[in-house]
Amino acid sequence: MDTRSIMTQRVVIQWTLSSYYGWGIYGLNLALNWATDPSIEAISAANIRLDQISIDAIRRQALMPFFRRSIDLQAGFEPFANRGVTAHAPVLIALGNGFVSNTAAHNVTLDGSPSIGVIFFEDAMDAAALARAKRFALVITGSTWNEQLLRAYGVEPVRTVLQGIDPSHFHIGPKLGLMPDRFLIFSGGKAEIRKGQDLVLAAFKIFGARHPEAVLVTAWHSPWPHLARTLDRTGKAAPIAFNKDGAVDVHAWARANGVRSEQILDLGNVPNALMASVLREMNVAVFPNRAEGGTNLVAMECMACGLPVILSGNTGHRDLIENGNCYVLEHQRPVPGAFAGVGGVSGWGESDVEELVTRLEQIFDDHAEAARRGALAANTVSKLSWAATAAGVKRLVLDCV
């Protein structure tokens, strides 16, 4: 008899929850979707920072048992500070390039029974990384591209579960039309070489000069502003500018690249739950990203809101592209490993600035076609909810126990 359907399985999420960046949003939505699931008792091994979790009172109330369990677990780590601990439950461990993970609360290196890796990566794996991969009973990737790379490296078992969106926030809906005389171009994602903000500025300089009503709306801030310095490697834009607080100074960087300040609207740090109403005001979203270990969560949220989206035809973006649901940047040149700092991993793509400008012109000239593709995009992403992600991860976890 299969008793899993009537038993509750504790599952530990090893990374920090937040409303302000990708990993945090992933963990937060796993916790929310498992909060009412009788077969899963989720718990966090990372410090709970309520100031980083911007959600409504109903969601916060649903998570209170999760918060209490997590705080109790983390208190139990204190005697084991700076040491290794094995939990008597499966542990989902966040992984990046090189199969490297952060520690849990009290600087504890956490393993599970079993340890299950969740990975988004863009760099080549060396022998040390592949040795670290053996720690995991299962590796869950965020894109077909990542799964293919890992299988080529001989990493098994590996499965893909795509990220999701919260359809209660991100969906087609009315816009207020607060800037009706402007053509609003959205660009989101933390400032770094992978995300291609240098290509966005280069294209906008051309497009904005032709169309003075165009405004570039940016959401480029992150907890890791130092990563923006990687954009200086390309030579495609002036050196990145920072303000006195160490954050990227978007206006100063735009001016250095020949873009007028009045054509830039920098959103700053916006919690995930408040982004949807901003996105619905946009005319287009642009993502000439060089590599995505996942599908690109920000792009998914734009698509869910029915925006016409311009996507580079590489890496994780390929999981989103289907049946004319977006404008694809098809001209993808290889990105040299030394230039990108990726050690030669296959799949990265360098988008063509002129093609990006052409796609912007297409959307500017044909609103009906842009709306049609936006509707198709929303239909695509409607199948990729956080509920579906949580169900997929749960199924794989229970199969490992």
Image (cartoon, rainbow, N blue to C red):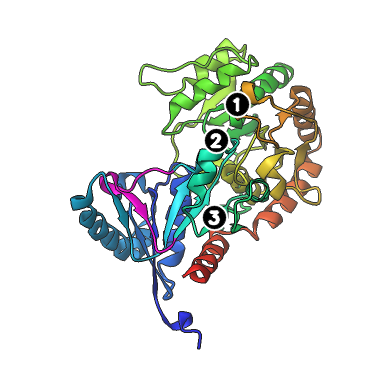
Residue, disc 1: 197
Is the C-beta separation of discs 1 and 2 under 8 Å?
yes
State the SS at label 3.
strand
Which residue: 35% across, 21% down?
245
User: Looking at the image, is mark 1 or mark 2 earlier in the sequence?
Assistant: 2
Which residue: 25% across, 57% down?
71
Residue 179 visible, this orientation: no
- Look at the image and give the residue range highlighted in magenta: 101-114
Specify the amino acid type for callout 3.
Answer: Val
Specify the amino acid type for callout 2.
Answer: Gly
Task: Left or right? Give the position of 224 relative to 370.
Answer: left
Q: Quadrant of residue 185?
A: top right
- Residues 283 and 321: in front is 321
Q: Is residue 292 above or below residue 236?
A: below
- Residues 67 and 90: in front is 90
Specify the amino acid type for callout 1.
Answer: Gln
State the SS at label 2.
loop
Task: Left or right? Give the position of 345 relative to 365.
Answer: left
Which residue: 59% across, 47% down?
301
User: Looking at the image, is mark 2 or mark 3 earlier in the sequence?
Assistant: 3
**Labels 2, 3: front one:** 3
Residue 333 forms part of the magenta stretch: no
**Labels 3, 1: front one:** 3
Label of residue 189 in the image: 2
Task: Left or right? Give the position of 352 relative to 290.
Answer: right
Other-residue count near label 1 (Cα within 10 Å), few / some / many at <14 / 14–19 / ≥20: many
Is the C-beta separation of discs 3 and 1 under 8 Å?
no
Query: What residue occupies the far bottom of the structure in this picture?
Result: 1
Residue, disc 3: 139
Location of residue 309 in the rendering, given as x and y in whole percent from the top left corner: 70, 40
